Amino acid sequence: MATVSKHAAASLGRTIRQVIVGDSVRPSVRRASWRHLVAASVLLLAGCSHAPAPPPPEAHVSVVTVQSQAVPIVTELPGRVNAYRTADVRPQVNGIILRRLFIEGSEVKKGQQLYQIDPAPYQAAYDSAVAAQASARSLAERYKPLAESNAVSKQDYDNAVAARLQADAAVETAHINLVYTKVLSPISGRIGRSLITEGALVTANQATALATVQELEPIYVDVTQPASTLLRLQREAAAGLLKQSETGKPQVRVRLEDGTDYAHTGTLEFSEVTVDQGTGSVTLRALMPNPQRILLPGMFVREEIDEGVRQDAVLAPQQGVSHNQKGEPVALIVDRDGTVAQRVLTTDRAVGDQWLVTSGLTPGDRVIVEGLQSARPGAKVVAEEYKRTADESGASEAAAAATTATGRPSATAKTTAE
């Protein structure tokens, strides 16, 4: 093509000279020169238009080479704190409240007196019942020898014995009502605010409670998760992957709402769960010690469950994983010959700023994390290992140090990584 172009250019030059000096050229030669000029121009333009274009330069991308490693698996679940036991204090007799005998928000013991209801009418009823009991007992005792000697009828003696028994029951009832004028705590725990004051009239078994006592040691932490999470935890517990307590139950930790770790570990209870038919979720209940009463009912916490250490796990950086039109996670990798290929992944969960990949990647694969816009499947690229910045390196080292020391990423490491 280059040779044709050179000949056409030379011919075109001769023709132009002939046309320019056309005064000495015959008209027939001049017309032939013009035709030759047009043909040479077309040939020259055709030769130039078919010149091969230079190949585009190969794109440069940054990659992360994934490796297999041991990864501690920690499941973090949001939950609420609930009291171990809750008891509403209600009066069992009618009367006027004379005294409140506790400090609001304090610890009370089971059987401790909380309120005093006016006992005067119940004391009088008790005294009257005791007097009636003495009269009935005396009558029955007098009728006994008389009935044996047939001085009185057997029916009269039986009626006297029955009256004595009724008097005994009346005394017991009056004594119970008199005792109920002292409103006692049904359980040990922390009592809340009093909903009534001295001088208030209360009735037996009223709807409004006088106060509420909650047992806070130990205490429950309830989390709501899909039933699939419960099934996975049960399988892992049966396989021995979960860290067990001395009682053989999975251990859990709690992170408080301000981000600090709770000092005590608890146990996960699988027996106290129900499945919500509408949402398909279950409530996982953990039992936590609470000696300092730090955990309070209604408090929001995050529960962490150690699911063991997964060996030969493959972690992929989140910035190198996207999703296709089907919603499947995909990643672009660079083969040994520099060709880009797309892989469909199966991910389990996020571990810091990486995905735990269960299928789709093998150790040694190079995942593209920068230059994704210029990388297309099948294209040739120049791959360079991704270099972390100082901030990223510091966050990674902090997370690794926290994981080594505690077996799990710390709150600071997680926050920095995320």
Image (cartoon, grey):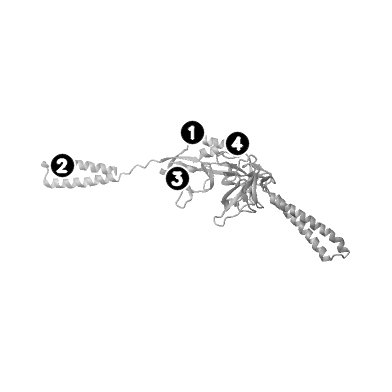
From the image, tell me which residue sits under label 2: 18
Front disc: 4 or 2 = 4
Which disc, if any, is residue 390? 1
Front disc: 4 or 3 = 4
Residue type highlighted by circle 2:
Gln
Residue 129 on image: x %, y %: 75, 55
Q: Can residue 283 be seen in this view?
A: yes
State how far apart marks 3 and 1 are (Cα).
29 Å
From the image, tell me which residue sits under label 4: 405
Front-most of residues 187 and 373 = 187
Name which of mark 2 and mark 1 comes first in the sequence.
2
State how far apart marks 4 and 1 are (Cα).
22 Å
Q: Residues within 10 Å of mark 1 (few under 14, many from 20)?
A: few
Name which of mark 3 and mark 2 comes first in the sequence.
2
Which disc, if any, is residue 340? 3
- Compared to residue 329, the image places residue 138 above or below, namely below
State how far apart marks 3 and 2 are (Cα).
59 Å
Q: Do the residues labelled 3 and 1 touch (CB within 8 Å)?
A: no
